[in-house]
Image (cartoon, grey):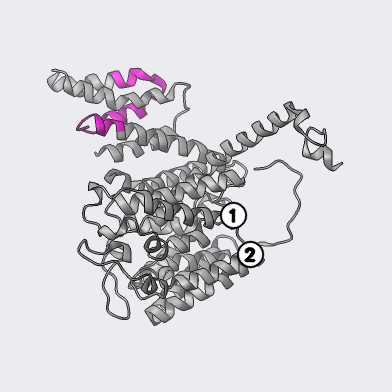
Amino acid sequence: MSPYDAVFLAVAVGLFLTRPQWWWLAALAPAVALAAHWMPLDRFATPVAAIAACLLVPRYAPVALVLVIPDYKGPLDVFQAVLLWLVVSTLMEGLEDRFEEKLLSSWVRRMSAQLLSVVVLYYTLLPVIFL
Amino acid sequence: MNSGPYIHSGSTTRALMVQATVALAPILAAAVWRYGTHAMVLIVSAVVAACAVDALCDRRRALDGSALVAGAIFACLLPGNAPWWIAALGGIITITLGKHWYGGLGQNPFNPAALARALLMGLLPAYFFAPRWTVDGVTSATPLAKEIDSVAPAVADLFFGRHAGTLGEAMPLAILIGGVVLLVLKTIDWRIPLCYLASLSLLALLLPAGDRMDGHAPWLAGNPLVHLFGGGSLFAAFFMLTDPVTSPFTLAGRVTYALLAALYTMLVRFYTPYPDGVVLAVLLANASVPLIDRYANRLRQNTVLQDQRRPADKPSGSSTGYESQE
């Protein structure tokens, strides 16, 4: 999975969770993954990175876990993924205001509207990988 | 949104849609003139599919004309050689996913036609990035995707539609006529197209042509007229960014929104292999609207509070505008 795909998957996973106060600490997960692969941990690098990422914000662990999966090539990759995740998460937080309960009465409808928005942002921001 | 009470402007959804249709008419006519009967097939396919699906989804509002306008705008985003079923599929996506998925008319956070175009471009890229044709046999995607050794197109050629592109880009002159109709009828806020086009021109002059522009024609940099009349900038400025549902409420918000759209358009055009980023820029700006509105409202409230704390500065001695009106 590319870092770009992982960012959007993490945002989609985050929709199903209650956002904790320190949610943004999950942004450290890509850095943790890179650091773990730089350390001489051999085949334990991935599990160690996963555990460390989950411990960053336990209530947001699924999001951090998804952000750990990609193979980050270097600090620039990590920086781009973190920035993109923060931007998309912030945009989605703003868009939540638009999904009012009186119009989208059921949870399924609200969630499907939010997932569609994530898909739209995925294609919208796709050129960013070339920047 | 501003707090009440509200005063009804007197305009209805149907009246707004009639005005938009009148403004779109010269663009659609120019597309048919430029691309022939196939353009007519595309427009009819998109509009009929959009109206039929809208009638199925919500019969009460089926005759308000919004589906017709959305379908026509989607048709304007199609390449001249797209198959008719792409137009029909796009019309269906525009209404189902772009409009009703979010709760119906007035609730969509994204421009429905732009959403449909972005999804189809992602799922079926061959139909959007493949070389296109014109009646003159010129083969290219858009003037902005010219090969690196090409020469800059003449501005007059761009202005009068002697180039390839989507149906909506067929003739910038027609878009300007449609835009003037919308401005005269006060259907749209003039500040959004002005800020968008002005910042686009400025960025075309200022953005450096670095290594990232490899593979792009060198004349793309420092050539604002090419960026104004080539690609979808003009169409988006008048017909997509100005959608009242997906644009900010405040003046500062609208300026920020237009600036953001212009910046993303130019970043995509200059530094990515995508020939044109207008539709994507519209969607990104749409997605930012709730945040822009939130911060613009906060800024306005802070300004009002500061004014209230400085009553001596007010010539009338009143603390708010409302008191002076009483």
Q: Chain of mark 2?
A: B
Q: Are marks 2 and 1 in contact (CB under 8 Å)?
A: yes
On the image, the x and y values in percent for residue B282 come to 45, 53
Quadrant the N terminus of chain B occupies: top right
Q: Chain of mark 1?
A: B
Q: Which residue is mark 1?
A: B244
Q: Secondary structure at mark 1?
A: loop
Label 2 CA crowd tier, 10 Å (few <14, some 14–19, many 20+): many
Towards the viewer: A31 or A53: A31
For the question of whether residue B142 can be seen, the reply is: no
On the image, the x and y values in percent for residue B221 come to 32, 55
Image check: A3 left or right of B26? left
Name the kind of residue labelled 1 in the image.
Answer: Pro
Membership of A54 in magenta stretch:
yes
- As drawn, the label of residue B15 is none
- As drawn, the label of residue B16 is 2
Quadrant the C terminus of chain B occupies: top right
